[in-house]
Image: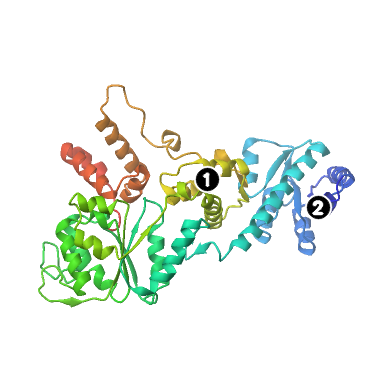
Amino acid sequence: MSDVMGSRQVLVVDDEKLIRELLQEGLGRLGYQIRTAGGGREALELLAQESADLVLTDIKMDGMDGYEFLEELRRRVPDQMVLMMTAYGSVESAIRAIKLGAFDYIQKPCMVAEVDHRLRKAFEHRDLLLETRMLRGRLEGREEFGRIVARNKVMKQIFDMIRTVAPSGSSVLIQGENGTGKELVARALHHYSDRADKKFVAKNCAAIPDALLESELFGHVKGAFTGSVGDRKGIFEEADGGTLFLDEISEMPLNLQSKLLRVLQEGELQRVGSNDVVKVDVRLISSTNRDMKSEVQEGRFRRDLFYRLNVIPITLPPLRERVDDIPLLAEHFLKKYAQRMNRTILGIEEGGMRYLVSRRWEGNVRELENTIERAVVMATGPILDAGSFKPLEQFAEEGGDFELPAADITVDEMEKRLILATLKRYNNNRTRTAEVLAISIRTLRNKLNEYRAADPGLSAIIDKGAPDAGE
C-alpha cells in the first residue's frame, strides 16, 4: 500500500460491532487510518474533537439513522466527504442519500476490496476539488473584470479598453451576438466611470411596443394620450447624471431616432405632450446584435445617429471564438448555482468539460450559463459528466408539449406550434421564450400578433398571465 493512503483518515459509523471491526482491520491493513463509532451521535462527538477525511456510515442504525446523521453532519461540516452503506439497498435509498449530499453508495455485504475502490474514487474527487479551489484562488482578481469572467486575449484587450474609455463620458456602441455579455460591458463602463455613484438605467428597446417607446424614453405629461393620468418621467430623466444603456438600439423606429439624436446633441428633451424643455446629463451606452453599417446602408437606421452613437465601438467575440474561456466560465457558473441551490457539486469531470468545449454555443455565454444551471438542478451526484449537459434542443425530453408534426404540415404551421409550445412552457414569459428560440422579442411579438389576428381564439393562450416587465 502506498504511503499516500496512510494519510487518509476514515471514520466508520455502524451500530454493528462486527462490521466496524472487520472494516477497521481490513482497511487498516491497506494503510488507512481508521476510527469507529457505534452511531450517529457518537460520530458527531468524535468529529467535533478531530476531523476525518471521509466518513463511511451505515444508513439503517438504531437511534439516529444514517439519513439524520448525514443531514446534521452537512449542517456542521458542509464539505465533509461521506459514503453510505446499507443492507437494504434500493434505487430510492441511493437517490435519497446522494440528494442529501453523500458522494457514493455501497450495498452490504461488501468486500474490503470494493470499499477500498470506492474510497480511492472518493479521494480522487476530493483532490480534484481541492486543486480546483486552489486554481480559483490563483485566478481570482486576474480573470474577473466587474462581473465579466474571461482569460481570452481578445477579452482582456476589451477590459483594457473599458478602463481607458470609461472616464471619458463619450457614447459607446457595443456590438455582438445575443448572449455575449453586452450589458455586463455596459455596467463595467459605468462602474469605472466618474458617474459610478449615480444611476445605471438599462432598457431593451425591442421589449417596448413602438407606441409606448417615446414615452418610455422621454416621459409624458397628463393627458398626452389615452391613459396618461399624470405626469411621468422617462428613462433619460431617471438616468440624469448617470448612465443610460439602450439594448437593441437597432430596433428603434426611424421617427424616434431623430428625437434621440436631438437629445444627444443638445442635452435636452421634451416630454410627450409638452413644449417645455428639460435639460439632462446622461452618458449613453447602446448595443445591438445587428451589423449597424448594413442597417444604415439599407435605410433602417439614421447615418447621423449611428455616428453619434459609435464614438467608441466595442465588438464582443462570440463564445466559439473564445473557447479558452469555456472551462473558466463553466466553473464560475457551477460555483454560482451550486451555492445558490445549496447543492454539493464538486466539479466537472474531464469528459464533461470536453463536451462543453466542443459545443458551438450559438446562444453564447447565456446558453452556457443556462446549461450549467440546468445541470446543477438535475444533478444526482457530486460530479457532472457529459450526460449532465443534455441539450435544450431536445425539447420533448425536457417536458415540452411540442411534437414532430405530420408530413403534410406547412413550415409556417410548424413554426407556429413551436413558438406557442415554447411560450406555454415558459409560462408566457416572452423574454425567456425569445431567448430560447434565438429570435428578437420584437420578432416574437409580431408573430404572436399575426397568430392572434388570424385566430382570435388564441388570445386566451397568447395573453395568459401578466406581460413581461418592459412590454
Residue 398 in percent (x, y) is at: 44, 38
Q: Secondary structure at mark 2?
A: loop
Label 1 Cα crowd, 10 Å radius (few <14 / some 14-19 / many 20+): many
Residue 395 is left or right of residue 49, and the answer is left
Alpha carbons under labels 2 and 1: distance apart? 31 Å
Residue that label 1 marks? 375
Residue 436 in percent (x, y) is at: 37, 44
Q: Is residue 224 above or below residue 355?
A: below
Write the residue at 39% across / 68% down. Answer: 189
Whether residues under marks 2 and 1 lie with C-beta atoms below 8 angstroms apart, the answer is no
Residue 311 in percent (x, y) is at: 30, 66
Give whichever of discs 2 and 1 has the lower sequence position.
2
Q: Give residue 459's mark.
A: none
The quarter of the image holding the C terminus is bottom left
Residue that label 2 marks? 8
Badge 2 amino acid? Arg
Residue 287 in percent (x, y) is at: 32, 58
